[in-house]
Image (cartoon, rainbow, N blue to C red):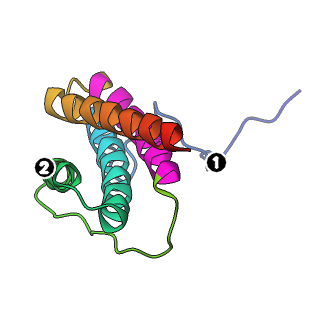
Amino acid sequence: MYEPIRTKSVHSTMADAPSGFPHRTREEELDIQLAGHLAALLAVTDELRALTPSTDLDAAATRLAEQVARLRGGHTPVRASLTAVQEPAALHERAHALAGRALVVAASRADTAAAILAAERMDAHAAARQLSGAAH
């Protein structure tokens, strides 16, 4: 009743022969994700440093840059320059969220150093948000 298929399917499946493009492992994907979250947190930290310089933010930026470089195989991250003036409270809010995302990924890949750093930054930004909220 039905005619048999005479040509090979153009759609490949996982069971087919290996394709011509490389695949990343779960760990590699998590490294990329974690480096991205930490790099975004570094960018916000650099913006905060430009608005409200502090030794705590300087130290955090250095540690974040080291972790991003480690995860990217030694490639140093691009550092942000101040582009638009934002409220420090909004930047602390964004930094807190980014640190939380980094913490989740660091925990899932069992990266203790990155997890500790992300947790410390979450605490620091939460405290800064509370101080800025009390000032208003």
**Where is mark 1, residue-wise?**
7
* Structural distance between the alpha carbons of marks 1 and 2: 48 Å
The amino acid type, in three-letter code, at marker 2 is Arg
Left or right side of 121 for 112:
left
**Where is mark 2, residue-wise?**
70
Q: Would you place residue 69 above or below residue 81 in this image? A: above
Check residue 70 for magenta coloring.
no
Q: Position of residue 101 (x, y in %)?
A: 42, 35
Is residue 101 in view? no
Q: Position of residue 25 (x, y in %)?
A: 29, 36
Counting labels gives 2
Q: Quadrant of residue 20?
A: bottom left
Q: Quadrant of residue 44?
A: bottom left
- Toward the viewer: 14 or 131? 131
Mark 2, residues whose alpha carbon is within 10 Å: few (<14), some, or many (≥20)? Answer: some
User: Which span is picked out in magenta?
Assistant: 89-107
The amino acid type, in three-letter code, at marker 1 is Thr
Decide which of tag 1 and tag 2 comes sooner along the chain. 1
Report the quarter where the C terminus lies.
top right
The residue at the point 38 percent across, 40 percent down is 128
